[in-house]
């Protein structure tokens, strides 16, 4: 990873679901013209509602357990997990999604479906980083030295 890359911070467990390939559509209240490689960063904190999803929602529990995550305490935070390719963005009203995606996203009218390609590059060791709101730029460790 040389130079700057665009990144987006997602709350857990959604960041890990993207990295595991379980979630291929991220829903947002806003759109962007950006398309291309995008780093997925897991937010620093896991809020109580998200902890409850991991503990009690069968869809989340099963999808995460398939990848060795059995508790919210197993989820990485404050780290870049993977690189995805953002290929398309569409209003949720114009996009047909699967039942699985519907379980992991907010497809209410007025929102946007950010569609990722199937090829995901997962880092063996997640990269510690501070996140930010909206799209942000990450400068590689190589450049910072």
Image: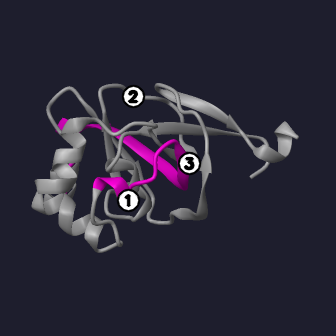
Can you tell which quarter of the image residue 43 is in?
A: top left
The residue that disc 2 covers is 31
What's the residue at 35%, 25% (across, down)?
30
What's the residue at 64%, 32% (across, down)?
137
Side of 120 relative to 63 (left or right): right
Tell me which numbered mark, 3 or 1, is placed earlier along the sequence.
1
The residue that disc 3 covers is 80
Side of 96 relative to 116 (left or right): left
Counting from the top left corner in percent of width and height, residue 66 is at 29, 74
The residue that disc 1 covers is 74
Between 79 and 72, the one lying in front of the other is 72
Q: Are marks 2 and 3 in contact (CB under 8 Å)?
A: no
Tell me which numbered mark, 1 or 2, is placed earlier along the sequence.
2
Alpha carbon distance from label 2 to label 3? 22 Å
Tell me which numbered mark, 2 or 3, is placed earlier along the sequence.
2
Does the magenta segment cover residue 84? yes
Side of 124 relative to 114 (left or right): right
What's the residue at 11%, 62% (across, down)?
58
């Amino acid at each position: 990873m040389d130079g700057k890359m665009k990144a987006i911070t997602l709350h857990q467990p959604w960041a890990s679901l993207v990295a595991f390939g379980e979630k291929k559509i991220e829903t947002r209240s806003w759109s962007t013209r950006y398309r291309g490689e995008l780093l997925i960063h897991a937010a620093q904190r896991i809020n109580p509602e998200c902890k409850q999803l991991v503990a009690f929602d069968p869809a989340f529990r099963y999808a995460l357990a398939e990848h060795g995550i059995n508790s919210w305490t197993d989820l990485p935070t404050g780290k870049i997990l993977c690189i995805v390719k953002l290929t398309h963005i569409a209003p949720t009203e114009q996009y047909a999604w699967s039942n699985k995606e519907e379980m992991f996203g907010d497809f209410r009218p007025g929102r946007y479906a950010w569609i990722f390609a199937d090829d995901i590059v997962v880092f063996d060791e997640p990269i510690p980083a501070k996140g930010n709101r909206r799209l942000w730029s990450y400068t590689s460790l190589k450049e910072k030295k």
